[in-house]
Amino acid sequence: MSATTTLQGRDASAAPSRPPAVRHTRGARFLLLFAVFLCAACGLVYELALTALGSYLIGNSVLQTSVVISVMVCAMGLGSLAAKPLRRRAVGAFALVEGVLALVGGLSVLVLYAAFAWLQLYTPAMIVVAVAVGLLIGAEIPLLMTLLQRIRRQEAGSAVADMFAVDYIGALVGGLGFPLWLLPTFGQLKGTLVVGAVNAVAGVIVVVFIFRRQIRRWVRNALLAGVTVVLAVLGTTYAFADDLEVTARQQMYRDPIVHAETTSYQEIVVTRSTAFTGEPDMRLFLNGDLQFSSVDEYRYHESLVHPTLAGSRANVLIMGGGDGLALREVLRNDDVQHVTLVELDPAMTRLARDFDALRDLNDKALEDPRVKVVNADAFNWLRGARQRYDAVVIDFPDPDTAALAKLYSVEFYHLLGQVLTPQSRVMVQSGSPFFAPKTYWSIAKTIETAGYSTTEFQVDVPSFGNWGFVLATPGGGTSPPLRLASGAPQLRYLDEAVLKAAAVFPVDRRRQDVRPSTLMDPAVLEYVQDEWENY
């Protein structure tokens, strides 16, 4: 959201009583418009940083985005009104606004991360920060418009057009630069600090190079000293950012963190400790959600994979599962000839290949010559896929964001049908029938609505609790049999008796009347957010 969304034409173009005429250099107007460009880019980055952080820490990206945008836009309007009395001293006021915005915006991610880690007050803190940043962004445009008119008087419409054009271009650069360059290069915490420094420099450009003759020397020196302090604070924080991030992150996890990184898609954290059994316990978390514990992950992955491979299995597709653990189970079958692993985040498959502890746990599965790794969005990848697969293992995280909910939609399973044979077997991890029964049965109904026959079952995974899966085959005929292949390898958890019992649900967790999930009506997202927030 660019700063000009709160611009009111008459206020923006109206100038207070004209100060004594000052002759400006030819480049003064260009420098001021460049400052507008920088301010717009920085403002949008702050907004994107707040929405991304909320999605990582809290989930529910739609709600986080809606709250941040609505709160900031409202605050921007108020900031624009509040800046009207400041236009008489527009130069000093603008420098002051930029200095405070640089400090508040630059430190925003660190403050919110700390509020989440230590105080568990993320949402109230986020609203306060969004209001503060929005007020300051809103104050920029009336002040900048006043300064623009001081350099060269223009008709109101022409001045607004110039300001809008530069502002929107800056917003474009900020919006694209955040995910494509700033986040991958610096990460969220350091990235906002860098943007804060740019914001401070924008104030310096206006004060020092354009309007230095219009303010008293002591005022100019005071403003420059203030900007220097702001840059020093941001620079010092940048120098200690890694340590601060590690300390805050460790506060959120019970066990020592041995690996952590924030990618363009998610926050990846690996912890390691000693379990009560005396075994090493390595755990993988994505955006704070547990993905596996090395102590009992075999229960989950045996249940996910081996009933799927009870039919033909020469050509297997795994979607998700970038840790390589489902792939490990697939490769235990010698008659599997080819496996395609589709994982969105290349950092996850790189970790599975290069991080020694995880590489040992997955038995170096990603190095097997039968494996082809594709780093792509599964939904879009399916739209262009033409190869047919005998068995499909779907191991996505729970659908607690809009981006994940589309992978549990009727449309997704329709696309999946394009790569199946009439005899293909598909397994979908489907959450917990005990903790989230509506979510579980909505996934099952969604698969059925897409034209599959299904068999539902549940297992116990101590680190997760009760967990459920849906086995599906194309066509609306008889439910697929829940069994193991005759040549299945020796397993630690599953056998035919366990599978037979797994298909029986207790009375209080049997099929419920729920809606299927589609792209336009992501019911599964509604259910998962409603159910998991109670645990």
Image (cartoon, rainbow, N blue to C red):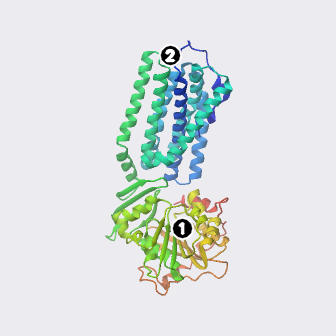
Identify the image quadrant of residue 78: top right
Q: Amino acid at mark 2?
A: Gln
Comparing 267 with 342, the one in front is: 342
Q: Secondary structure at mark 1?
A: loop
Q: Going by the image, does 276 lie left or right of 120?
A: left
Q: Quadrant of the N terminus?
A: top right
Q: Percent from the top left, x then y, of residue 151? A: 57, 20
> Compared to 334, does 419 lie above or below?
above
Q: Residue at x 40, y 61 (%)?
A: 351
Q: Residue furthest bottom?
A: 486
- Of helix, strand and loop, which one carries label 2? helix
Dot 2: within a 10 Å radius of its alpha carbon, few (fewer than 14), some, or many (20 or more) residues? Answer: some
Q: How many numbered badges does the structure rendering display?
A: 2
**N-terminal-most mark, 2 or 1:** 2
Q: Tell me if residue 121 can be seen.
A: no
Query: Which residue, given by chain and number where applicable, does mark 2 sit on?
Result: 214
Instruction: Identify the residue shown where x is 51% and y is 79%.
Output: 314
Which residue in the structure is indicated by mark 1? Answer: 431
| Residue 133 or residue 216, whichever sits in front | 216
The span from disc 2 to disc 1 (Cα, nearest Å) is 65 Å
- Which residue is painted at 54% across and 22% down in the image? 90
The kind of residue tagged 1 is: Gly
Residue 526: % across, % down: 61, 59
Task: Find residue 484 and name its label.
Answer: none
**Residue at left offset 49%, top offset 82%:** 498
Q: Quadrant of residue 131?
A: top right
Using the rendered image of the protein, determine whether residue 164 is visible from the camera's viewpoint: yes
Report the residue that reaches farthest toward the left: 278
**Residue sitting at the far top:** 20
* 356 shown above or below 475: above
